[in-house]
Amino acid sequence: MSLALDAAREAATAGEVPIGAVVLGPGGDVIGRGRNTREQVPDPTGHAEVLAIRAACAARGDRILDGCTLVVTLEPCVMCAGVMLAARVPTVIFGAWDAKAGAAGSVYDLLRDGRLPHPVPQVIAGVRQAECATLLEEFFARMR
């Protein structure tokens, strides 16, 4: 989570919503890293998770990320959860809950919806939750 938080801080410095993500390979090595870039690019798919998954898939030369873990500072949205399922990420770890758009247990639970034709990943929530939430709260307080 420390690496994801570092990426989130980089996003904030660039004027982006401070969300960061990393994909860890089966051995625990970082194979993908991302931070929000929606405003800079501009691109509505420029979410930290999507960019980290793209980088991990490129590094592995495969669209399937079996044996990998995605760590992100905020509960994934519907789009990001869909990408995680499509990439078959078996473990997802996130920090802060997203009561407005979360798709891993708060508003929706897309990741664990067994009706979808994808393996259901293990979801570990609330890792360094206060630190992740504070980063977002401080960012939005500055924006107002």
Image (cartoon, rainbow, N blue to C red):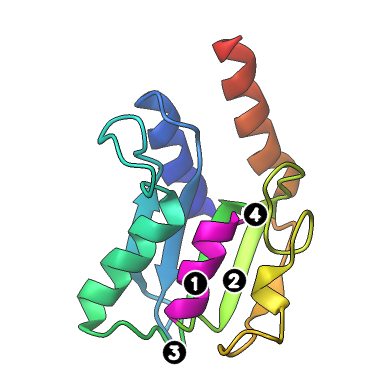
Q: Distance from label 1 to label 2 (Cα)? A: 8 Å
Q: Is residue 36 above or below residue 116?
A: above
Which residues, given as a range, are shown in magenta? 76-87
Residue in view at x 25 percent, y 36 percent: 41
> SS for tag 3?
loop
The three-letter amino acid code for the residue at tag 3 is Asp
Q: Badge 3, how many Cα within 10 Å: few under 14, some, many 20+?
A: some
Query: Do the numbered discs 1 and 4 sit on residues whose CB atoms are within 8 Å?
Result: no
Question: Dot 1 corresponds to which residue?
Answer: 84
N-term mark: 4 or 2: 4
The three-letter amino acid code for the residue at tag 2 is Val
N-term mark: 3 or 2: 3
- Report the disc number at residue 66: 3
Question: Dot 2 corresponds to which residue?
Answer: 92
Give the x, y percent position of residue 81: 56, 65
Closest to the observer: 79 or 48?
A: 79
Q: Is residue 69 left or right of residue 131?
A: left
Question: Dot 4 corresponds to which residue?
Answer: 75
N-term mark: 1 or 2: 1
Q: Distance from label 4 to label 3 (Cα)? A: 21 Å
Q: Badge 4, how many Cα within 10 Å: few under 14, some, many 20+?
A: many
Q: Badge 2, how many Cα within 10 Å: few under 14, some, many 20+?
A: many
